Image: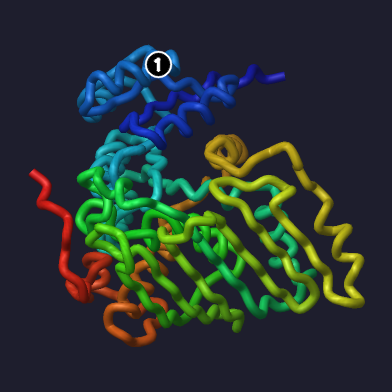
Amino acid sequence: MPSPRPPYRVAIIGTGGIAHAHAEALAELSERARLVAVADLDPTRAAEFADRFSVPHVFNDPQALLESEDLDLVHICTPPQTHVPLASMVMRAGVTALVEKPTALSLREMDQLATVQEQTGSKVLTVFQHRYGAAAVRLRRLAGSGALGRPLVATCETLWYRPDAYFEVPWRGRWDVEGGGPTMGHGIHQFDLLLSVLGPWSQIAALAERQARPTDTEDVSIAAVRFDNGALATVVNSLLSPRETSRLRFDFEYATVELEHLYGYREEHWRFTPAPGHEGLSDLWIEGAEPDITSGHRLQIEAVFNAWETGQEPGVCLQDARRTLEFAAATYASAFRGVRVAAGELTDDDPFALSMDGGAVPWEPVKEALV
């Protein structure tokens, strides 16, 4: 038998909160991957992170990290406005970049990443870990096979709560740093999962408001969506909801499939209801259930390794991530222009292709300028 390949060599750029989820996932995959280096502008934070996760090499400059280490994968866990320059730097070093959501702040930036990807032959992948839970994978398989019938109606709700104090962090709630509010930074995981099941969307009519929080961005958005396959859906993204929940519901011809969780789901968070006369579908639904596994970063990272080892393209690829980001851009464009927006409409120099606010936000900014 051939000897097993050596573990993949992995680095993390940015050692803030979300980086801990990445490091913990890599620790669970220790037989397949080694976290060999980290980089952060804050040397104290980087050192504490390296000590906690037993990382041998610490850098305060990502370029120095890339020049010093032989790597297979670099996780980018920095604030959103840095994602594109860092991902480009990683790809130019000949390494795959795995970028936290959102991949970029605009469709224009996504296209810039596509250019670097084409030039270098390296890939940029986006973290949308909820696609990889066993039930989501099963749902896509059953929906794609036609076993559930046509998709008809769906709802997608990210109803979270963030107090005013959350926005005291200087870079939060800013279009130029985060790219948007809950539509970009919070609900994007839920509606990415929606899109992964229902496929391409064709039209959006949306509203977005700053109802209560001290933020330059919206704190709530609501969209009505038509899909290419004829399904209709509503998508709500809120930071104003004291009873927090994340909900998805898919009504197919022959069954309803529901998910309610908060930041990660298990099998127990799903509910399958067959239509009268289609009770046998319940047996299909429970095939392959994995009750003890929570959706999270480990499943997506593991899927990347599996794809490499079987000669497949790993997800979530740039094209898929762009569709999800276009959904966010179209939500803002529809809300601030007061019109329906079609898929593919935001092209070239359209203001909403250049930035999520489109230069059309109807309320005054309240955040102090960054120095």
- Front-most of 346 and 194? 194
324 up-or-down from 117: above or below = below
Q: Residue furthest left?
A: 371
Q: Name the spot of residue 32 as percent of width and height, x first.
A: 57, 24
Q: Name the spot of residue 328 as percent of width and height, x first.
A: 38, 67
Measuring 33% from the left and 59% from the top, which residue is drawn there? Answer: 181
Relative horizontal placement of residue 193, taking residue 252 as reference (left or right): left
The amino acid marked with disc number 1 is Val
Relative horizontal placement of residue 338, taking residue 223 as reference (left or right): left
Let me know if residue 110 appears in the view: yes
Q: Residue furthest bottom?
A: 339
Measuring 53% from the left and 30% from the top, which residue is drawn there? Answer: 25
Quadrant the C terminus occupies: top left
- Residue on which the image places disc 1: 55
Q: Name the spot of residue 264 as percent of width and height, x first.
A: 58, 46
- Front-most of 313 and 287? 287
117 up-or-down from 329: above or below = above
- Front-most of 270 and 238? 238
Query: Dot 1, crowdedness within 10 Å: few (<14), some or many (≥20)?
Result: some
Q: Secondary structure at mark 1?
A: loop
Quadrant the N terminus occupies: top right
Measuring 41% from the left and 77% from the top, which residue is drawn there? Answer: 343
4 up-or-down from 247: above or below = above
